[in-house]
């Protein structure tokens, strides 16, 4: 029974929209200075404070589909990222954590304000955030418009986990360049 439980903790979650249990993301195999922890290879706390100003590391997920939001949140956390989720563009725009957001993952088709409208609003207000658009209804016109406007990635649902991970990594680079996918 103990062996089964141990194997379950090593289970890599799939991005299916269903709930999956993982044993947590704290990596206890690394030694770190007192007052800090190792989180998937990154040192936080006392050991990282000497680097000076912290970079933005928050990923914000905006989608009106609760199951997609929760799945995306679990996936990003399993990769070691800090995540906030929002059910609408308006809710995200009103968030006090908007300035901390280093990457935005948003659905295109949402009521009131689409993901592309949200991206444009951020640009217009001087809050340019590397943005990944996702949609269950991809079309070439939306994709071309989004990439021409500067969106980082345009992905189809269900999202390919590896491609999404590459897009998020690209968002955290200072010289992000647009990339698209069907």
Image: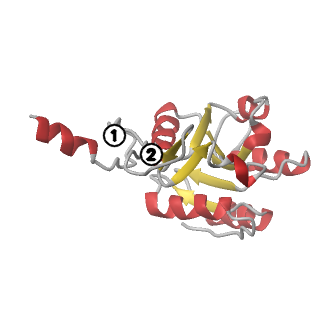
- Residue at the image point whose x is 63% and y is 42% from the top: 46
Q: Nearer the viewer, residue 20 or 57?
A: 57
Q: Is residue 107 left or right of residue 70?
A: right
In the image, taking residue 17 as reference, residue 150 lies left or right, namely right
- State the residue in front, 5 or 48: 48
Residue closer to the observer: 102 or 142: 102
- Cα distance between the residues tagged 2 and 1: 8 Å
In the rendered view of the protein, which quadrant contains the C terminus? bottom right
Question: Cβ–Cβ below 8 Å for labels 2 and 1?
Answer: yes
The relative height of residue 38 versus residue 84 in the rendered view (above or below) is: below
Q: Can you identify the residue that label 1 sits on?
A: 22
Displayed quadrant of residue 178: bottom right
Instruction: Evaluate whether residue 160 shows in this view.
Output: no
Residue at the extreme front: 34
Sooner in the amino-acid sequence: mark 2 or mark 1: 1
Q: Say what secondary structure mark 2 lies in.
A: helix
- Quarter that holds the N terminus: top left
Residue on which the image places disc 2: 78
Badge 1 element: loop
Residue 174 rendering spot, x and y as whole percentages? 74, 65
């Amino acid at each position: 029974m103990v062996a089964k439980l141990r194997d379950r903790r090593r289970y890599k979650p799939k991005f299916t929209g269903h709930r999956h249990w993982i044993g947590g993301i704290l990596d206890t195999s690394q030694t770190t200075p007192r007052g800090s922890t190792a989180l998937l290879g990154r040192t936080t706390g006392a050991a990282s404070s000497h680097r000076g100003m912290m970079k933005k590391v928050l990923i914000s997920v905006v989608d009106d589909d609760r199951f997609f939001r929760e799945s995306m949140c679990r996936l990003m956390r399993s990769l070691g990222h800090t995540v906030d989720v929002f059910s609408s563009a308006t809710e995200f725009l009103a968030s006090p954590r908007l300035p901390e957001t280093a990457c935005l993952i948003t659905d295109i088709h949402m009521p009131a304000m689409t993901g592309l409208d949200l991206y444009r609003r951020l640009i217009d207000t001087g809050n340019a955030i590397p943005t990944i658009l996702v949609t269950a209804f991809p079309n070439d016109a939306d994709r071309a418009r989004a990439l021409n406007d500067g969106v980082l990635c345009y992905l189809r649902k269900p999202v390919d986990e590896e491609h999404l991970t590459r897009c998020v990594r690209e968002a955290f680079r200072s010289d992000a360049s647009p990339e698209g996918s069907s």
